[in-house]
Image: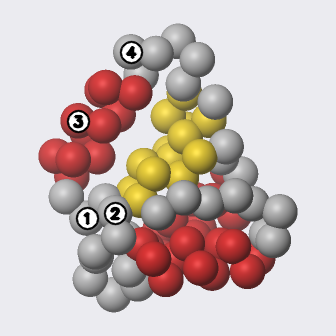
Amino acid sequence: MNVIIVDDDRLVVSSLNTILETDPEIRVVGSGYSGAEALHLCQRLCPDLLLIDIRMDGLSGIEAAKRLMNQNPKAKYCF
């Protein structure tokens, strides 16, 4: 499973990356620190899963997820 991690706290991103990569079935293919980066990374890398913080300055994780869902109606989501 290809995963992208996005959070405005770099320590959280690093920690989640470390935890997730202990599972051989999970590959962290990208990480970012803003909602705008999440949009760019998802368009470029097409992950199976986006793990995103909901509270970030600028474009929130919720708004980024809504935009991604509008771009790809077949995508599934969970809040």
Residue 74: image x %, image y %? 83, 63
Q: Can residue 74 be seen at all in this image of the molecule? A: yes
Instruction: State left or right for residue 43 relative to residue 24.
Output: right
Q: Quick one: label 2 or label 4, which is nearer the N terminus?
A: 4
Secondary structure under tag 4 reads: loop
Q: Quick one: label 4 or label 1, which is nearer the N terminus?
A: 1
Q: Quick one: label 3 or label 1, which is nearer the N terminus?
A: 1
Question: Which residue corresponds to the image point at 25% horizontal and 64% vertical from the top-left?
Answer: 8
Secondary structure under tag 2 reads: loop
Residue type of the residue flagged with mark 4: Thr
Q: Quick one: label 3 or label 2, which is nearer the N terminus?
A: 3
Distance from the alpha carbon under mark 2 to that under mark 1: 8 Å
Question: Which residue corresponds to the image point at 42% horizontal and 72% vertical from the top-left?
Answer: 61
Question: Which residue corresponds to the image point at 54% horizontal and 27% vertical from the top-left?
Answer: 27
Secondary structure under tag 3 reads: helix
Circle nearer the viewer, 3 or 2:
2
Q: Which residue is mark 3?
A: 15
Q: Quadrant of the N terminus?
A: top right
Q: Can residue 32 be seen at all in this image of the molecule? A: no
- Mark 4 residue crowding within 10 angstroms, few (<14) / some (14–19) / many (20+): few
Q: Which residue is mark 4?
A: 22
Q: Quick one: label 2 or label 1, which is nearer the N terminus?
A: 1
Q: Which residue is mark 2?
A: 53
Residue type of the residue flagged with mark 2: Asp
Residue type of the residue flagged with mark 3: Ser
Q: Which residue is mark 1?
A: 8
Q: Are dots 2 and 1 in contact, CB under 8 Å?
A: yes
Residue type of the residue flagged with mark 1: Asp
Dividing the picture into quarters, in which one does residue 3 lie?
top right
Q: Are dots 4 and 3 in contact, CB under 8 Å?
A: no
Q: Are dots 3 and 2 in contact, CB under 8 Å?
A: no
- Mark 1 residue crowding within 10 angstroms, few (<14) / some (14–19) / many (20+): some
